[in-house]
């Protein structure tokens, strides 16, 4: 997509949005005292080029590229002997089998859409939901998912929520944004071409898309927007317990409970209903009069959802759509596209193979030592928090002491094996569609089995091959994953300062999530439980509001806002991570602060498309240059080291600083 020629994208305040492609030129002034992220990264920004098939380049993209390369290599040699590893190997080669995929064409999808097309009433639709194999039900107007109970994290719950929308964010159906227009145009074009491929005329396809969007427009006012979902208090508001009988009354003609029981879930005493108004309102237009709209909602969304897994033509249509949404151009080589797709479909078979191939015990030990020192430093930060009472501090320290720390990969693989999952390989005459259906059925059966037992809190929630880290509040556990601890983020030759500025900062960030605007709602056992005194909670929320206002004053370019209300959790974690590092640094002799600060800037080096910027603007994470500049300007150590004064772009007066911890 071409940028709007009437918009000056170099008008960002208080800093130039150097993450956006085209804003930085050789003539752009870059001073450490005015725009630290730009000054450190300018030469690299000018030198870098966004690789084909991607919407950005930089440190995190480099990690992804390395991860793709490493994962791909695992599938290009001889087939492994172990059951789970061979599943991943076979799925990769089924994705690569264009002869088989092209021979099938869109027939697997057409079988499903033809069966939907035959539905003529709500009773027939409900029968279709209950009688069709789960792997062929690609979209529902409601959703039911399992997971740990927010209030009692030792047990599982079933949460009932809304169905999905083509444009994802319900706010786009109320007022279409510039980014929403890009997504709508791209998805409509994909749906149009997919429906024609399924045998509909151009006019029929156009009408079906209009019907789909009309039904979604009815749904949208009942569904929280992305901004609402990302509010700190959303989870508490979504925890609405209903008895079986009350949910039965609420669901009306929508067969939520009957479908759950058909799928094998035992009847529960209580269910969590995330959106209490959704099912009653859905019933108002879940009628025979609207059966055509509902049919087309299912057909259009199914076509869009499966395009990437059909023949080459459909795959290329899906790629073109994704490129339009992300701003990427060209196509990835098949191997580079399918390796991460296999890792997403078979997380643990790929995760184990990745860990056994690339990850080392000595790195695990070194990183664990870093984490232990950071936890100890955080103890001091909590103990010295002037806005907290001794009672709340004691609870916070209990939570810190109870926190689980998982590094690189699990110590045992027994819990992650999947011997019950089987599908035919390419050599055995299998197809990609058949394999994906088998995986879908297996995941459902596993979900039923897991739901019936207690939550295993020792089980990792994310596989080690993922290029990410995370904190899970219902487990009170930090995960530092092997796929993330690579390249410029971590390598065994790094100095302590470099490791602290990259991986160490991320570790501190994840620990801080336990005490941000969302994580602070959960206690040491992972239960949603208010462990704060009333006065301390008010003081915390006041500091959080100040941070929200701080980000609301920033703009990537004139006329484009950020959403400070959704960024406070990640921003709090960013600043908490740096505060921990600076506490550790203060105890080290001859510590090189320049290396530390520059390493943070390098970690968030990025250059991306306009669409990539739009995506980040609506994300809970601040854009990369903000994660650097906003974090660093909170601390005297940074201000003093570079001699930053009032009037410099990186200066922030002590009374205006917003670091919470």
Image (tube, rainbow, N blue to C red):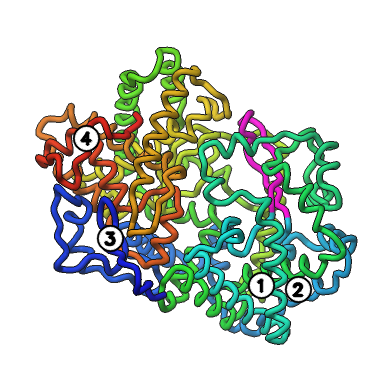
CA distance separating discs 1 and 4 = 54 Å
Circle nearer the N terminus (2, 4)? 2
Q: Position of residue 296 (x, y in %)?
A: 74, 70
Name the element at disc 1: helix
Using the image, determine if residue 421 lies above or below residue 144: below
The residue at the point 50 percent across, 41 percent down is 412
The label shown at residue 113 is 2
The verdict on residue 37 being magenta is: no
Verify CB contact (< 8 Å) between mark 2 and mark 1. Answer: yes
Using the rendered image of the protein, determine whether residue 564 is visible from the camera's viewpoint.
yes
Circle nearer the N terminus (2, 1)? 2
Magenta stretch in the rendered image: 142-162
* Front position among marks 2 and 4: 4
Q: Position of residue 51 (x, y in %)?
A: 34, 72
Residue 190 in which image quadrant: bottom right
Report the residue marked by disc 1: 303
Few, some or many C-alpha atoms within 10 Å of disc 1 (few <14, some 14-19, many ≥20)?
many
The label shown at residue 11 is 3
The label shown at residue 402 is none
CA distance separating discs 2 and 4 = 61 Å
Secondary structure character of the magenta stretch overall: strand
The residue at the point 49 percent across, 20 percent down is 532
């Amino acid at each position: 997509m071409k940028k709007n020629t009437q918009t000056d994208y170099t008008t960002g305040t208080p800093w130039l949005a150097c993450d956006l492609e085209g804003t930085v030129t050789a003539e752009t002034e870059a001073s450490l005292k005015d725009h630290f992220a730009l000054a450190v990264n300018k030469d690299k920004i000018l030198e870098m080029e966004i690789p084909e098939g991607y919407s950005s380049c930089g440190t995190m993209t480099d990690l992804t590229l390395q991860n793709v390369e490493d994962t791909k290599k695992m599938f290009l040699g001889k087939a492994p002997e172990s059951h789970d590893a061979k599943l991943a190997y076979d799925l990769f080669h089924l994705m690569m089998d264009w002869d088989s995929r092209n021979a099938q064409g869109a027939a697997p999808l057409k079988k499903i859409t033809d069966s939907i097309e035959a539905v003529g009433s709500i009773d027939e639709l409900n029968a279709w939901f209950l009688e069709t194999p789960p792997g062929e039900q690609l979209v529902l107007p409601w959703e039911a998912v399992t997971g740990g109970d927010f209030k009692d994290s030792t047990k599982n719950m079933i949460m009932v929520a809304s169905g999905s929308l083509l444009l994802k964010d319900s706010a786009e159906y109320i007022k279409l944004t510039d980014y929403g227009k890009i997504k709508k145009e791209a998805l409509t074009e994909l749906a149009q071409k997919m429906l024609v491929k399924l045998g509909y005329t151009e006019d029929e396809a156009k009408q079906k898309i209009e019907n789909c969007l009309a039904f979604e427009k009815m749904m949208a006012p009942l569904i929280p927007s992305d901004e609402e979902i990302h509010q700190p208090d959303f989870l508490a508001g979504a925890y609405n317990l209903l008895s079986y009988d009350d949910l039965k009354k609420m669901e009306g003609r929508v067969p939520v409970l009957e479908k759950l029981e058909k799928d094998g879930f035992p009847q529960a005493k209580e269910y969590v209903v995330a959106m209490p108004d959704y099912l009653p309102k859905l019933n108002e237009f879940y009628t025979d009069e609207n059966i055509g709209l509902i049919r087309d909602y299912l057909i259009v969304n199914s076509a869009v959802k499966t395009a990437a897994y059909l023949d080459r033509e459909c795959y290329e249509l899906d790629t073109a759509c994704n490129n339009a949404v992300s701003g990427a151009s060209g196509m990835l080589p098949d191997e580079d596209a399918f390796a991460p797709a296999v890792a997403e479909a078979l997380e643990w078979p790929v995760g184990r193979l990745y860990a056994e191939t690339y990850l080392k015990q000595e790195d695990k030990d070194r990183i664990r030592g870093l984490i232990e020192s950071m936890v100890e430093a955080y103890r001091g930060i909590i103990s010295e928090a002037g806005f907290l009472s001794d009672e709340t501090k004691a609870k916070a320290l209990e939570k810190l002491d109870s926190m689980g720390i998982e590094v690189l990969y699990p110590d045992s693989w027994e819990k992650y094996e999947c011997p019950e999952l089987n599908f035919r390989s390419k050599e055995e005459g299998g197809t990609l569609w058949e394999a994906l259906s088998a995986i879908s059925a297996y995941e459902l059966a596993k979900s039923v089995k897991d739901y019936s037992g207690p939550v295993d809190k020792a089980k990792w929630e994310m596989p080690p091959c993922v290029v990410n880290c995370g904190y899970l509040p219902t487990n009170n556990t930090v995960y530092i994953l092997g796929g993330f601890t690579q390249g410029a983020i971590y390598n065994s030759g790094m100095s302590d300062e470099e490791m602290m500025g990259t991986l160490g900062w991320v570790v501190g960030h994840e620990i801080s999530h336990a005490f941000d605007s969302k994580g602070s709602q959960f206690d040491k056992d992972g239960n949603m439980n208010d462990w704060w005194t009333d006065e301390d909670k008010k003081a915390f929320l006041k500091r959080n509001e100040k941070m929200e206002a701080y980000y609301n004053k920033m703009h990537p370019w004139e006329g484009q806002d950020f959403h400070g209300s959704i960024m406070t959790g990640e921003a709090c974690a960013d600043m908490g991570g740096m505060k921990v590092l600076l506490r550790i640094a203060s105890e080290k002799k001859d510590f090189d602060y320049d290396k530390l600060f520059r390493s943070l800037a390098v970690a968030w080096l990025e250059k991306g498309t306009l669409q990539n910027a739009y995506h980040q603007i609506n994300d809970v994470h601040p854009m990369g240059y903000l994660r650097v500049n906003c974090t660093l300007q909170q601390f005297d150590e940074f201000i003093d080291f570079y001699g930053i004064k009032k009037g410099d772009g990186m200066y922030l007066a002590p009374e205006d600083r917003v670091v919470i911890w």
